[in-house]
Image (cartoon, rainbow, N blue to C red):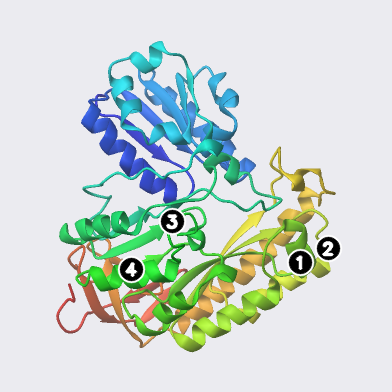
Amino acid sequence: MTAPIFSTHGCRLNAYETETMQQLAEKSGVENTIVINSCAVTNEAVRKTRQDIRRRRRSHPGATLIVTGCAAQTDPDRFSIMEEVDMVIGNPNKMQSETWRRLASNALRDAGCVHVDDVMSQTVERTHAIRAFGSYSRAFLKIQNGCDHRCTFCIIPFGRGPSRSVPSASVINQIQQFADNGYREIVLTGVDITSWGNDLPGNPRLGELILNILRRVPDLPRLRISSIDSVEVDDALFEAIADQPRLMPHLHLSLQHGDNMILKRMKRRHTREDAIAFCQKARALRPSMTFGADIIVGFPTETDCHFQNSIRLVEDCRLTWLHVFPFSARDGTPAARMPQVTGATIRERANRLRTIGREAVMRHLSSQIGVKHKILMESSDKGRTEQFAEVIFSEKQTRGDIVHATIDRFSDNTLFATDSFGEPHN
């Protein structure tokens, strides 16, 4: 082993930061190193990180093993005492060029095992120009980091710090570079991207940024936004949904629950009525819009009546792609001190909601038979529609092309197209 190995857990923001770290490590000459970029969103995520650490150590006994990311930031001692771990690096530190230069020269190891700065003191978001991102079809781009809200179940603000925005000019320059290098779709990501601009001069809003991107980078075919807080959506974003076909008709919503009492106990800023009204407005502006959502099952004090309101929300909002999270008490959060729902009840409710989610996906996919789509090819036989449904082709296509095709069938969670029509739209 010579080139460093990176393993990413968790969100798209972590995926973006892993790409950045890889390029910083390569530039600095780091070798024989394993870097695990951890997630702290649930106890299960932390468990999987620890499992990955042990597996990687068994495979590469002589490598320097580093743990970074949100779990490393919020609980560095938990990882530093693991015999498999050589070093723990915090979230602010992992994005600094100096960290990787010192690692390559062994100066970082000489300075100790734990290198975790105070994330709550961060006021400016560092940016790095990335030359490439995974496959040459879709790239993630961080536009924001951190969170100023304090949902009672969430540990992430303590792993990411306060909300910081990447300035518009830096965002647009990076997107133009991606477009120049052949990327067909950019996904804007962050911790709380609808708060983008609150800390910038003039307090611009996310919708303004999106309209500016589409205006300034006319050769970018597709722009997608990751998870948003619907209650923070501004008028300019609604304008983009209505008038900008290059903004993809798929929104992932941070809903978390369908009952107003539980939402209040979560310290969320929206009601179920707010969520329903947003989905109705967005779909009226863009009839092809599909929605994904995060929903937590088994939050403390959740009764079956509360849970039924989450079930009803799937229909009321016409949700398609559900991310169901069984509640996991995180030490240091207010929800961990509330009356807990039993594990058996949480598992049963999670299974019920996942079944409902699968049925929602099937309804959406069945409605696509005979529909013509523009599909971004991620490989020679697989791509995704604008609504983010996976499509498999029977004939080979060119990765990175946006292919026009008609859907002829579906199976499980996948659409199938046997042929394409017209010229690929690049």
Tell me, yes or no, whether the two marked residues, 1 and 2, touch with CB atoms within 8 Å.
yes
Q: Which of the marked residues, 3 or 4, is nearer the chain's N terminus?
A: 3
- Identify the mark at residue 362; answer none if there is no mark: none
Q: Is residue 346 visible?
A: yes
Using residue 292 as the reference point, say whether residue 383 is left or right of it: left
Q: Nearer the viewer, mark 3 or mark 4?
A: 3
* Image quadrant where residue 422 sits: bottom left
* Image quadrant where residue 127 sits: top left
Instruction: Give residue 274's position: percent from left, percent from top.
Output: 65, 76
The CA distance from mark 2 to mark 4 is 40 Å
- Identify the mark at residue 200; answer none if there is no mark: 3
Residue type, label 1: Phe
Where disc 2 sits, the SS reads loop
Going 46% across and 82% down the picture, which residue do you hit? 366
Instruction: Give residue 45's position: percent from left, percent from top.
Output: 57, 42
Q: Identify which residue, 320 or 203, lies in the foreground.
A: 203
Instruction: Give residue 396's position: percent from left, percent from top.
Output: 19, 67
Using residue 210 as the reference point, say whether residue 332 is left or right of it: right
Residue type, label 2: Thr
Q: Which residue is mark 1?
A: 307
Going 45% across and 21% down the picture, which residue do you hit? 87
Q: Which of the marked residues, 1 or 4, is nearer the chain's N terminus?
A: 4
Q: Nearer the viewer, mark 1 or mark 4?
A: 4
Which image quadrant: the C terminus? Answer: bottom left
Q: Which residue is mark 4?
A: 223
Please say if 115 is above or below 259. Answer: above
Going 48% across and 54% down the picture, which residue do you hit? 199
- Identify the mark at residue 303; answer none if there is no mark: 2
Residue type, label 4: Leu
Local packing at callout 3 (Cα closer than 10 Å; few below 14, some 14-19, many 20+) is: some
Q: Identify which residue, 359 or 327, lies in the foreground.
A: 327
